Amino acid sequence: MERADLNIEEIVSVVKFHKSIFFLIFSGVVIASVVASFIIPSIYKASAKIIIQSEQNLHSPGLLPNTFEERVFLNMQKEIILSSIILQNALDEVQKSEGILKGFDYDKIKKKVNIDYLNESNVLEVSVYLNSAKDAADLANSIAKTFLDYQSNAKIELIDKIFLAAKKETNALKESIDKIESQLKELSDKEKLSFYQAQIPFFMNNIQEVERRNMSVDSGIERIKEELKLANKENISGSNYPIMSSITVTPYALPESNTQLPTSYLANIPWLQEMKQKVADSQTELSNLLSVYTEEHPQIRDVRSKISLLQGSLNDEIKKVLSNYNEYYLNYVKYLEQQKKDNLSEDKRYKSELDKLATKMNEASAKQIEFYALLKYYESMQEIYSIFLRKQNELKFLREEARSAGVPNIRILEYAKIPLKPVSPNFALNLLLGIIIGFMAGVIGALMKDRA
């Protein structure tokens, strides 16, 4: 045939015409596929399944660092398994214990391992493809165990680092708390504000008492000076007369209302009272005589002369008394003025002590404010210290848990079993492919023979 385009009927007729060529090629391809299925080494797949969950809800927030989202965390576990740390250690383990896979290294074994999550779940399948079914199962299980041990050791190492940091911080907090306790004790041992406040009435009462004394002294001095002025108006002078022994002066003795002053004391002197009585009797006698006689009568003149003599003698005696009183009370005024100076000095001392007390009160108040501020800081430090102690205890528990039970968020769901059938070569698939390819090759061979 010379035509280049053929229809189905023409192709069928060509194949029938050259059926010997078609069957030869077809049978050859099919036989080759069957033979290849027996010649190609068998490859077995062994799979171990691991459940991987995030640690986010397995412990107290902030106890361990959690900087990854769950999907990132899960993908990271795949990379960890495919790393040389896991695969090489797993290979070394099976080579040492089982004596298999001699001559394999990390690069070769990595090509034989496939890691993936099943149906987008948290179940990670570790698949190993090897010519030996037992070797594939042993290596898959070794990879799963090595990965689990790595996670456990890594977690223990992380916990130890965090624990040491927490312990260091806890010790520093304990030192700070001890120091604050010492400061609080030192502040509490000092006199409190109430101690100084209790002393204020004592000093205030003393100051008021001194002021009362000074007022009394001032009043006494004024009274004495008035009496002395009254006495000086009479121009009294004369020798001292020893009549002052009856007056007693004691410290802080002030001229109260019952104190006898110069003018008021005159009525109490016996001989002056006697002389006054004589003058009064003479005046009474004069009055009686005047009712009978005239002024020119000798008896009246005698009585008047007698009264004049008595009054002159009384005045002389009064002058003598007032002169002695004047000297005495001038000295007494000096004494009272000295008492006033002493009182003022005492008042100054009490006020100075009160000022010192006010200064100490201010210091005590500042110390009290410092004490309560430090106490509040101490309580907050105690709370932080308790948190760190609790964190240490939780870390100890996690460390013991990781050592005894492994990592709670990662566990082997299913160990790999020795596969019974290989995954490659697939005899049925190879035969089907041989039939399809043989048929196509036979048709093409028949057409080429017909064209030739």
Image (tube, rainbow, N blue to C red):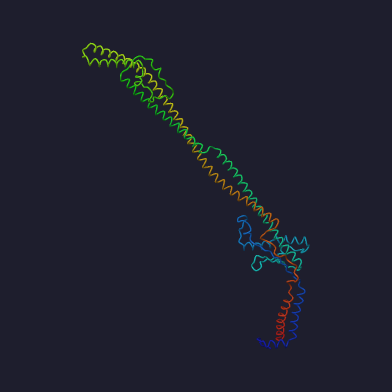
Left/right placement of residue 77 relative to residue 180 reads right
* Residue 14 place in picture, x, y as percent: 70, 87
Tell me the residue at 57%/47% (across/down).
Answer: 379
Q: Hey, which residue is sitting farthest right in the picture?
A: 99
Q: How many marks?
A: 0
Vertical side of 217 occupied by 412: above or below = below
Tell me the residue at 39%/21% (across/down).
Answer: 332
Residue situated in front as seen by the camera: 166 or 436: 166
Tell me which corner region of the image, top left, top right, bottom left or bottom right, holds residue 60: bottom right
- Quarter of the C terminus within the rendering: bottom right
* Residue 225 place in picture, x, y as percent: 35, 23
Residue situated in front as seen by the camera: 228 or 368: 228
Residue situated in front as seen by the camera: 221 or 300: 300
Tell me which corner region of the image, top left, top right, bottom left or bottom right, holds residue 93: bottom right
Tell me which corner region of the image, top left, top right, bottom left or bottom right, holds residue 327: top left
Vertical side of 265 occupied by 74: above or below = below
Left/right placement of residue 372 relative to residue 39 reads left
Left/right placement of residue 309 relative to residue 33 reads left
* Residue 439 place in picture, x, y as percent: 71, 82
- Quarter of the N terminus within the rendering: bottom right
* Residue 301 place in picture, x, y as percent: 24, 12
